[in-house]
Amino acid sequence: MKAVVYKEPFSVDIEEVEDPRIQDPTDVIVKVTTSAICGSDLHMYEGRTGAEPGIVFGHENMGVVEEAGPGVATVKKGDRVVMPFNVACGFCKNCLAGRTGFCLTVNPGFAGGAYGYVSMGPYTGGQAQYVRVPFADFNCLQLPKGTEHEDDFALLADIFPTGYHATELAQVSPGETVCVFGAGPVGLMAAYSAVLRGASRVFVVDKQPDRLRLAGRIGATPIDYSKGDAAEQIKEQTGGEGTDKGIDAVGYQATVPEGEEQPAMVLNTLVEAVRPTGMLGVVGLYVPSDPGGPSESAKKGELLFRIGRFFEKGLRMGTGQANVKSYNRQLRDLIISGRATPSFVVSHRVPLDEAPEAYQHFDRRDEGWTKVLLKPEM
Ligand code: NAD
Ligand code: ZN
């Protein structure tokens, strides 16, 4: 089959690779109809993670079941399904508690499993014609047959539930004010989720005009951090207090300011932008190695978090991979009922063959390239 294969930093190619096959009785093989490119793929693409050349990318996958293993009870050939980016067993302590992003069976001691992701298990990615789905009864979310809402449903694999997870970590309640740092696909989904949860005002911080425009379209207030300190701008618009809740949807790829040693820690700005005793939801990725930046400590992932201000303000913080399975059914039903249309973030739909160029555009954050869906059958 054809698949998107990582070659070296800033380069992927389309190659013929082996078709996936049923390895365990609880597997299914899905014929991929949509697989999205994610900001998380860029960590590997830009060479920050030590991903081995040859790895097939793609953790945001949906499609139609082609073959089901003999131990699969509820999923059958022809079913249209979307899979959380987390590969999870469904029966370990963490999965039973709904923490499927930290499955102890598939990847003990680490942040769970994922398709096509370095250090997250041996699961081949779905930016390909087919993908193997382990523990299929648990990991396949059933979708209505046909092609309706394809682009909305595709976002249930990761960014819509991840954005929602950020609002859950920050416990966004009706009437509250929220600031979201990062207007990438994840930040926009976090802002959208905050609106769905009844936030009275949502600020979205970025400097990309096209992304800030999208934030404006869903009723959020855009804040351009290139035009002045973002926390100050937010405080000015909240009577000097700051917002009730805050979300980091940037992580360690935040830009390194001129003359500084390490990426601008969005977290430190967030601490200033949120009112005392507020809560922070951190879904932007921080990993323990090689975040870039010239200093040795930055290269080891030891970024400077100013814990003093965090303590002084009595803030609380939730972090980590999203437990997609905890939200995807409910978010699917909001899509079906017409109350949510997350595909407003989708800017491009391209065949698999165009993935190499699409990666370049998305990686450079070229104007208008917000979210790319790869369509292997196009
Ligand atoms: P993205 O790179 O497209 O978006 C990041 C945005 O942040 C960009 O628009 C960029 O302009 C902006 N930005 C950079 N520096 C900034 C700063 N100092 N202040 C404000 N904005 C700044 O990526 P994405 O797909 O939206 O993903 C965002 C983050 O979420 C990534 O780190 C990704 O790995 C992570 N992620 C986490 C999970 C999870 O489960 N926790 C899931 C998916 C993605
Ligand atoms: Zn993703």
Image: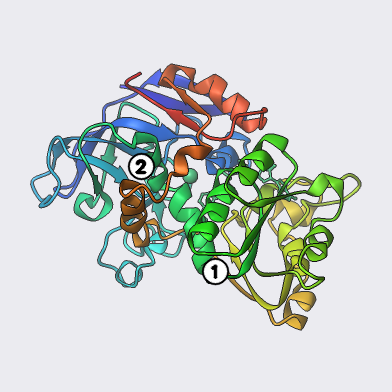
Query: Looking at the picture, how far across and down is residue 255, in whole percent?
Result: 76, 45
Query: Looking at the picture, how far across and down is residue 157, in whole percent?
Result: 39, 46
With 52 as the anchor, is 157 left or right in this view? left
Within the image, what quadrant is residue 298 found in?
Answer: bottom right
Query: Looking at the picture, how far across and down is residue 218, in whole percent?
Result: 57, 47
Q: Which quadrant holds the N terminus? A: top left
Of residues 339 and 4, the one drawn nearer to the viewer in this rendering: 339
Identify the residue position indicated by label 1 in the image.
172
The Cα atoms of the two marked residues, 2 and 1, are separated by: 24 Å
* Label 1 packing within 10 angstroms: few (<14), some (14-19), many (20+): many
With 251 as the anchor, is 120 left or right in this view? left
Establish if 165 lies above or below 352.
below
Which dot marks residue 153?
2
Residue at 56% across, 20% down: 357
* Label 2 packing within 10 angstroms: few (<14), some (14-19), many (20+): many
In the image, farthest residue toward the right: 259
Of residues 65 and 333, the one drawn nearer to the viewer in this rendering: 333
Which dot marks residue 358?
none
Q: Secondary structure at mark 1?
A: loop
Q: Amino acid at mark 1?
A: Val
Query: Looking at the picture, how far across and down is residue 152, in whole percent?
Result: 39, 40
With 197 as the anchor, is 316 left or right in this view? right
Earlier sequence position, callout 2 versus callout 1: 2
Q: Secondary structure at mark 2?
A: helix
Q: Which quadrant holds the C terminus? A: top left
